[in-house]
Image (spheres, rainbow, N blue to C red):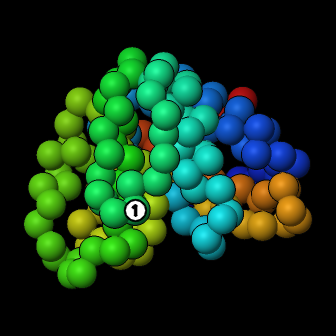
């Protein structure tokens, strides 16, 4: 697993990093977002969606669990925080191995269902608007994606 860190000073800067990632992703890519409430997970997803060419407003799927957006590739935005049971069958494999990109907030809730190859993004508060973003790759495809994002 390879890791690197990026410090951003504003939500706009965080979204720009995610927007770049949105231009690099391919069908079947899985990105997990970890971090405290308000750390910027949904903000990051908004930037990613912009990079994918999504025109709709992106907001947290807290109560619906999964929201789908159309862009260059479908974006599957998941917030699994409220799942009752980790083994609840939501057909996640169809999303993970489908035609789109999956972004999962609170991935620890479904650890056993996550694909092995995934990009793990952790966001931490440094100040009111600054964030520490740790990016770790787990698998060959996510390593390639991480290197492209870092360059």
The quarter holding residue 74 reads top left
Quadrant in the picture for the N terminus: bottom right
The spot of residue 22 in percent (x, y) is 53, 30
State left or right for residue 129 relative to residue 61. Answer: right
State left or right for residue 124 relative to residue 9. Answer: left
Quadrant in the picture for the C terminus: top right
Residue at which label 1 appears: 62
Q: On screen, 70 above or below 13?
A: above
The quarter holding residue 48 reads top right
The spot of residue 59 in percent (x, y) is 48, 47
* Front one among 24 and 84: 84
Residue at the spot x=60%, y=35% of the render? 47
The quarter holding residue 101 reads top left
Residue at the spot x=23%, y=30% of the render? 99
Is residue 144 visible in the rendered structure shown here?
A: no
Q: On screen, 111 above or below 147?
A: below
The spot of residue 116 in percent (x, y) is 33, 58
The spot of residue 31 in percent (x, y) is 45, 49
Other residues around mark 1 within 10 Å, as few (<14) / some (14–19) / many (≥20): some
Is residue 49 visible in the rendered structure shown here?
A: yes
Residue at the spot x=39%, y=22% of the render? 71
Residue at the spot x=35%, y=32% of the render? 69
Circle 1 SS class: loop
């Amino acid at each position: 697993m390879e890791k690197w860190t990026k410090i951003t000073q504003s939500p706009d800067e965080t979204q720009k990093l995610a927007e770049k990632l949105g231009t690099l992703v391919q069908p079947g890519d899985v990105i997990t977002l970890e971090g405290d409430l308000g750390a910027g997970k949904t903000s990051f997803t908004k930037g990613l969606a912009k990079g994918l060419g999504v025109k709709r407003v992106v907001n947290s799927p807290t109560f619906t669990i999964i929201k789908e957006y159309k862009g260059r590739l479908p974006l599957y935005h998941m917030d699994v925080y409220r799942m009752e049971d980790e083994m609840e069958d939501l057909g996640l494999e169809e999303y993970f191995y489908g035609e789109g990109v999956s972004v999962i907030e609170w991935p620890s809730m479904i650890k056993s269902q996550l694909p092995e190859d995934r990009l793990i993004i952790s966001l931490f508060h440094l100040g009111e608007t600054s964030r520490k973003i740790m990016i770790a790759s787990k698998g060959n495809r996510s390593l390639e994606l991480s290197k492209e994002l870092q360059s």
